[in-house]
């Protein structure tokens, strides 16, 4: 217990649970919460819940201290409670279950009641008061509910026990092929843990917990070792709290289709900082199980379960196969990889969405706000462009949403690449792309509310951010507050109207969407089809936004971005709170906060000799010749480029000698021996009238 919490009664959490809660920054919160919801009795709804169940999971430790997880079953009603402190269980363990030898008075048990059709579950910590002919009776030490995360819904079917083969029990110390196959294909298992610290408090004893994920979420490393992801849960840390005090665990795998059981016991280690975590979707940490011994119980259960649906939370998690593919893809993130166009959707009169799936490789996850860099051979020349992702990281495909850029007369295409995507590419075609990147990134874990301002096609990162906030809210049970304002010329030009509104509705008002149109047709309904006529203004922001400190995100045409930035600054929003996507040659002109320090930049040379080393060409550069990309293009070179603002990295080349200066900000990750052509110029060198640099081009 931390010094800042002063309670008279003992904590509902033992020292191990408290240590992990403190490590995760939720100690005081969970102490207050636990004292309200962890009881030494069963509420009436819990008593009714256990009474209607056909089975219950049980955790215990044997005489040598090894934890085991077990299942007891009988017709609904086999568990009943004569009062709020006791529970009678009229069922006995199956043949070969180590629980058979443990049913004695004072044995500590952990019980998990779980209703698979409804995904409801409740937990008990208890001890046996007496044995009965049909089973035993326990006294409640702690009772509490659990959230339904990662529980797959299943329909139960009972078989005639008399028609089943005789159960078979096999002692094991290694995982054979059958055991490994069962584990590798499982989407559910149960884990028992145990702590006997001698305190006598209700918080010590046995525990049994549910673990769920997509099939393949448990990795079989060898015939004695498993590696398992740990997802965000209820912050009790009952299992891990026991682990750090007593590094042993019991695992129970059910064959839901055959009724076989695989019960294992062994030692565990928690992998807090494993580099594999970042590649496994949904994993907060990993843990490893080392088998000591176990039993295979064949034909153990007359119960069969038919899978109905995976938990919504399960869909947000990964598998070890995907994690390995993502790790491999990360090593190749700077290479061009093929993507197939799976679907093309018209979002507005000028915007189309393209759904892209990886061909022969794993697409990397991204942060909302980042972009994809595409390459194609157009008009006899290799063209590279960047497009912000409008999909969410949890999606199984990338989605880019591209505006068709027309000339001023509207009769011929202005954008070569956007014209190609709109008119020259079809479903089934393949296009080359590099992994997502970019410094314009949304932070869903921030406690500050977010303001998203989008103009025209600038809505693309905003729909990604909003959808990600919604899915993260499902995973973490906390949705960051977002206010989105989208501006467009007319409703025909507006994209993602229905999609954004559906996201807002699903968020239960944590995400709010407002629409501003410059041109409004008579058939549109105010308050439903739009909320504001004209540009985003100070009056609109003051009417919509409660007083608070926001993280602001801007994306749209250069004029929209600058006007929005200036507007926010006039309202007192600090520069450090305004994030903007700055693609194209025009960058945002910022006004630094009073306390902000200007970045020290290398002084720019007045004159320089630039050597293009691969071509053995030297050219004279002077101020007014622009950045090195413009300079190279003016002399007949065609270097790769995408955003022309230093964000995508497509124009990065080797700097053979000399120094360069950057007049605009660029992402981290540019080494001393590299240069971003689109935002670099030759740097002045003390004592040299004419600077010299050599770039590989």
Image: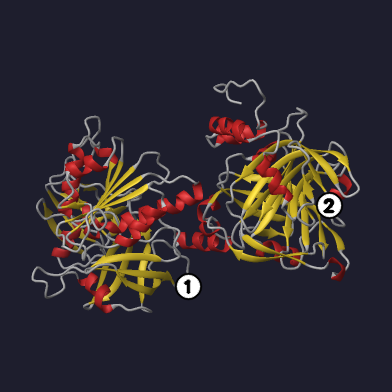
Please give the name of the residue rendered at 77% of the width and 28% of the height, measured from the top-left corner: 200
Q: Give residue 486's quadrant in the image.
A: bottom left
Q: Give residue 612's quadrant in the image.
A: bottom left
**Label 1: element kind:** loop
**Label 2: element kind:** loop
Residue 471 at x, y percent in the picture: 45, 54
Above/below status of 8 relative to 176: above
Image-based side of 56 in relation to 365, left or right: right
**Label 1 neighbour load within 10 Å: few <14, some 14-19, many 20+:** few
Disc assigned to residue 538: none
Above/below status of 555 relative to 419: above
Q: Quadrant of the N terminus?
A: top right
Q: Which residue is mark 2?
A: 91
| In the image, farthest residue toward the right | 133
Please give the name of the residue rendered at 32% of the width and 71% of the height, measured from the top-left corner: 345
Colouring used for the render: secondary structure
Residue 567 at x, y percent in the picture: 17, 42
Please give the name of the residue rendered at 58% of the width and 25% of the height, measured from the top-left corner: 2
Disc assigned to residue 360: 1
Q: Nearer the viewer, residue 150 or 305?
A: 305
Q: Quadrant of the C terminus?
A: bottom left
Residue 213 at x, y percent in the picture: 60, 57
Image-based side of 213 in relation to 494, left or right: right
Q: Nearer the viewer, residue 99 or 89?
A: 89
**Label 2 neighbour load within 10 Å: few <14, some 14-19, many 20+:** many
Q: Nearer the viewer, residue 536 or 625?
A: 536
Q: Is residue 217 visible?
A: yes
């Amino acid at each position: 217990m931390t010094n800042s919490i002063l309670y008279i009664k003992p904590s509902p959490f033992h020292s191990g649970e408290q240590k992990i809660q403190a490590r995760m920054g939720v100690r005081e919160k969970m102490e207050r919460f636990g004292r309200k919801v962890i009881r030494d009795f069963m509420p009436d709804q819990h008593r009714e819940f256990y009474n209607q169940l056909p089975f219950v999971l049980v955790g215990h430790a044997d005489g040598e201290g090894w934890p085991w997880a077990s299942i007891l079953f009988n017709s609904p009603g086999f568990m009943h409670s004569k009062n709020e402190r006791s529970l009678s269980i009229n069922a006995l363990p199956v043949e070969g279950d180590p629980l058979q030898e443990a049913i004695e008075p004072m044995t500590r048990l952990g019980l998990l009641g779980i209703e698979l059709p409804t995904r409801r579950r409740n937990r008990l910590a208890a001890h046996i008061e007496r044995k009965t002919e049909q089973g035993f009776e326990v006294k409640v030490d702690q009772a509490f509910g659990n959230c339904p995360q990662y529980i797959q819904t299943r329909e139960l079917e009972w078989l005639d026990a008399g028609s089943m083969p005789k159960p078979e029990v096999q002692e094991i110390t290694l995982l054979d092929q059958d055991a490994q196959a069962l584990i590798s294909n499982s989407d559910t298992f149960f884990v028992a843990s145990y702590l006997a610290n001698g305190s006598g408090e209700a918080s010590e004893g046995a525990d049994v917990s549910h673990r769920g994920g997509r099939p393949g979420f448990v990795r079989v490393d060898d015939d004695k070792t498993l590696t398992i992801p740990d997802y965000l849960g209820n912050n009790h840390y009952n299992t891990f709290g026991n682990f750090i005090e007593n590094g042993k665990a019991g695992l129970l795998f059910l064959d839901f289709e055959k009724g076989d059981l695989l019960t294992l016991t062994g030692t565990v280690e928690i992998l807090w900082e494993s580099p594999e975590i970042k590649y496994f979707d949904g994993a907060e940490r990993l843990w490893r199980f080392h088998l000591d011994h176990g039993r295979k119980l064949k034909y153990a259960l007359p119960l069969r379960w038919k899978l109905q649906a995976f938990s919504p939370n399960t869909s947000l998690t990964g598998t070890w196969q995907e994690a390995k593919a993502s790790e491999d893809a990360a090593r190749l993130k700077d290479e061009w990889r093929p993507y197939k166009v799976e679907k093309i959707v018209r979002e507005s009169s000028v915007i189309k969405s393209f759904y892209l799936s990886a061909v022969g490789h794993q697409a990397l996850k991204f942060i909302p706000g980042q972009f994809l860099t595409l390459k194609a051979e157009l008009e006899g020349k290799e063209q590279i462009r960047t497009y912000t992702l409008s999909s969410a990281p949890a999606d199984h495909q990338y989605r880019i949403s591209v505006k068709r850029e027309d000339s001023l007369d509207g009769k011929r295409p202005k954008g070569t690449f956007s014209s190609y995507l709109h008119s020259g590419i079809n479903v089934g075609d393949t296009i080359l792309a590099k992994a997502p990147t970019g410094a314009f990134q949304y932070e869903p874990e921030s406690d500050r509310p977010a303001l998203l301002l989008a103009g025209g096609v600038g809505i693309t990162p905003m729909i990604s951010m909003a959808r990600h906030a919604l899915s993260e809210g499902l995973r973490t049970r906390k949705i960051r507050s977002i206010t989105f304002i989208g501006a467009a010329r007319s409703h025909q030009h507006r994209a993602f109207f229905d999609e954004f509104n559906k996201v807002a509705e699903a968020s239960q008002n944590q995400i709010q969407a407002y629409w501003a149109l410059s041109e409004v047709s008579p058939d549109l309904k105010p308050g439903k089809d739009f909320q504001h006529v004209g540009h985003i203004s100070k009056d609109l922001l003051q009417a919509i936004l409660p007083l608070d400190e926001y993280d602001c995100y801007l994306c749209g045409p250069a004029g929209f971005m600058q006007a929005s930035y200036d507007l926010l600054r006039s309202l007192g929003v600090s520069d450090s709170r305004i994030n903007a996507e700055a693609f194209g040659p025009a960058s945002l002109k910022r006004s630094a906060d009073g306390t902000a320090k200007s970045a020290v930049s290398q002084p720019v040379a007045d004159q320089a000799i630039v050597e293009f080393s691969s071509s053995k060409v030297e050219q004279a550069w002077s101020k007014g010749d622009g950045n090195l990309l413009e300079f190279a293009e003016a002399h007949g070179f065609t270097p790769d480029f995408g955003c022309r603002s230093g964000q995508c990295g497509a124009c990065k080349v080797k700097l053979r000698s000399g120094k360069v200066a950057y007049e605009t900000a660029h992402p981290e990750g540019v080494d001393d021996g590299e240069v971003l052509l689109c935002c670099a110029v030759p740097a002045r060198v003390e004592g040299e009238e004419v600077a010299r640099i050599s770039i590989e081009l």
